Image (spheres, rainbow, N blue to C red):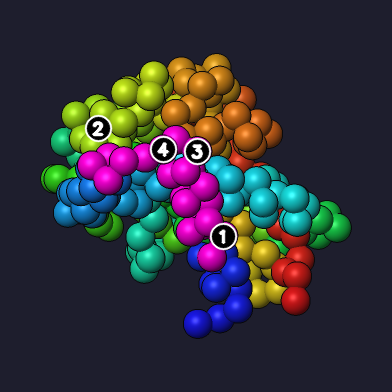
Amino acid sequence: MSERVKEVVDTIISSIRATMIEKQVTVKEYRAGILYLHELGLKGEIPLLSDVYFNSTAVENENRIYKGTRSDLEGPYYLADSPFITDEIKTLDDVEGEAMIIRGAITSVDGEPIANAELDIWHSTPDGRYSGIHDGVPQDCYRGRVITNDEGRYSVKSTTPIPYEIPSQGMTGQLLQMLGNHTWRPAHIHIKTKKKGFHELTTQAYFEGGDWTENDCCSGVCNSGVNIIAEKHEDGVRIMDIDLVLDKEVI
Ligand code: MBD
Ligand code: FE
């Protein structure tokens, strides 16, 4: 085991012990807590519950190190190996949605365009489901990897996502509500960048004025703030201009 893992795990264990002492947790309560975690795993909700409460903290840590576009939540629905695309993200014909063009320029913190960067884009269907995760949406839809051109620009067509609700009857949804919170995230587009020599940026873009942008149940937008995009329309199509600035990798 690495020193780093030992250091972090030792600290987690002490924090849990300190809480148990402070709150005088009984054996019965302890056992109920363990059963809760066991059931959470069986239901497949460990990534979801963890990301609701802790992804934003890891993001804040990274944002103290790297300049450029702020990092934001990856969330539980990123899938590796999504299809390479050129100008269009595959969508389902039988799910009605408003057309949207996502485009922008990728530059370095020095202002230089970054050609041949890989942008992995994923977002929900217009009815709030993620492909390859939720039923009925094939994995090659609503996701795609696009490569920036010689000017460091990209442009892809897709459909507009809506605010996302964490399943309110699931264990994570129930916990949020029990603790007095709601279960909504603002509509968002995920992007992960890959380019040799640059920090791998995982971020999100939100729609200005959209519901829940001020009150994300996962503390996403509240922290990043800057990734809220004012939408434009060209020829009746919604345009999301998402420009990203990448910092150099720290070696
Ligand atoms: C999502 O779609 C998401 O992006 C996050 C961070 C958490 C739950 C669902
Ligand atoms: Fe998401």
Mark 1 and 4 residues: CB-CB less than 8 Å, in contact? no
Residue 210 against residue 47 in the figure, above or below:
above
Whole-Å distance between the Cαs marked 4 and 2? 32 Å
> Residue 130, can we see it?
no
Q: Which residues are magenta?
A: 10-29
Residue under label 1, please give it: 11
Q: Is mark 3 within 8 Å of ligand 1?
A: no
Q: In x, y percent, where is residue 53?
A: 46, 40
Residue 240 against residue 194 in the figure, above or below:
above
Q: In x, y percent, where is residue 128?
A: 29, 33
Residue type, label 3: Glu
Mark 2 against mark 1, which lies toward the viewer?
A: 1
Whole-Å distance between the Cαs marked 1 and 4? 20 Å
Whole-Å distance between the Cαs marked 3 and 4? 6 Å
Q: Nearer the viewer, residue 250 or 226?
A: 250
Whole-Å distance between the Cαs marked 3 and 1? 16 Å
State the image quarter where residue 144 is shown. bottom left
Q: How many marks?
A: 4
| SS of the residue under disc 1 | helix
Q: In x, y percent, where is residue 56?
A: 55, 43
Q: Residue at x 45, y 61 (%)?
A: 145
Whole-Å distance between the Cαs marked 2 and 1? 32 Å
Whole-Å distance between the Cαs marked 2 and 3? 32 Å
Q: Earlier in the sequence, mark 2 or mark 3?
A: 3
Mark 3 and 4 residues: CB-CB less than 8 Å, in contact? yes
Q: Which mark is residue 167?
A: 2
Residue under label 4, please give it: 24
Residue under label 3, please give it: 22
| SS of the residue under disc 2 | loop
Q: Residue at x 58, y 51 (%)?
A: 58
